Image: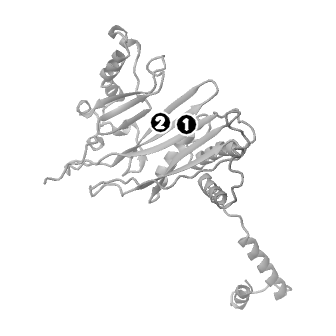
Amino acid sequence: MVKIVAKIMDTKFYQPRRGMSPLILTMLLIISGSSLLSCEQPPQSMFEQQANTKSATDSADHSNDDNNNTATAVVTSVTPAVTSNSTNSIAAPMINIKKQQAIARQPNCNALQTSCQYFELNVLEFSPAQPWLTSIMWQTIARALAPVTPLASQDERAKRTISMLFSQIEYGTEVVESLPMYQRIDTELVLNPVVSDPSTSSSDTAYLTVRSNQHRSDSRQQQVTYVMLDMQKKLQLTIEDILLPKVSTDELLLTFQTAKKEWLTLQDIEQKYHEDWPLHLSRQWYLDQQGLHMVYQSGELLTAKTGAVDLMVPYALLQGLIKPRYIVQPPIDPKP
């Protein structure tokens, strides 16, 4: 540091203030430099914190392994990478997907005597980095965990919300009444195959799923959120995005009426009552090799708790309704 100060003072740009001695100026520069060096590092993510906790725990002397009254931190090992395997020259770049896991348990809780509050968070890490996709993932998780939280659509706010909920359990000494006793979040990214026909303007698509499992003292709730993605344009798709010009959502809805009636028949609902359950386009939908899926949560189609309902319409019935670039087909096998 003294050498750096000396070099600064030797430059022609250095002009000491009148009346200030070189010794005093040197001391001020040293103090200022020390302050910069001692700046706090930015806070670690919950995954980094738990990785450090696990590392410290592994190196400590486990002389009391039978004591269950400590917070547990777990980080999963790296899972095999999942890659987009496209041969189309305009396809999105290959993406490696790695799973990360963080677990929070209520500290100072004897699991043998009472139920301990538990929160498990499983998310995805992308390589090379995909900020747009990571942002959508955190926003979707935040809306699943805290749907009434304002500004959950903002990336940083979403992360802070999840981190706060996580810390309430990991560092709290008592049960957080506003949170479920058990909750688990699982995320997956399903990459659709690319249409290999060069005559069509094919597009890489994928859908993100966020599965939320929550247990409270009086109920259990399971819900799956689907987010359809255009991997080339790097954005979340809406139903309107995939429809051809001048095609309305009402026209698309008509194609799902047959699928609805077939499902109601499987539920032993007489045909004359099928119109008593009007159908709407669900906010949960996705495209795969079978066709277009509309997912309805428990109670949306019937008042009875039937679990989630997945209605699917094949592409053959969607001709003239959705853009050809969003029709998912398996890659054409090369001729032997």
Residue 79 x %, y %: 45, 53
Q: Is residue 14 left or right of residue 180?
A: right
Name which residue lies at 61% across and 35% down.
182
Residue that numbered label 2 is attached to: 225
SS of the residue under disc 1: helix
Residue 329 horizontal/vertical position (percent): 25, 43
Q: Residue at x 30, y 35 (%)?
A: 291
Q: Secondary structure at mark 2?
A: strand
Left or right of 240 on screen, residue 325? left
The answer to whether mark 2 and mark 1 are in CB contact below 8 A is yes
* Residue 26, image quadrant: bottom right
Q: Nearer the viewer, residue 113 or 301?
A: 113
As shown in the figure, which amino acid type bears the numbered disc 2?
Thr
Mark 2 → mark 1, Cα distance in angstroms: 8 Å
Measured along the vertical axis of the image, is residue 104 above or below residue 258? below
Measured as percent of width and height from the top left, residue 209 is found at 45, 40
Q: Is residue 151 visible?
A: no
Label 2 Cα crowd, 10 Å radius (few <14 / some 14-19 / many 20+): many
Image height check: is 45 above or below 280?
Answer: below
Quadrant assignment for the N terminus: bottom right
Mark seen at residue 103: none
The three-letter code of the residue at mark 1 reads Ala
The residue that disc 1 covers is 144
Display coloring: one colour
- Earlier sequence position, callout 2 versus callout 1: 1
At horizontal 72% and vertical 71% (from top left) the residue drawn is 36
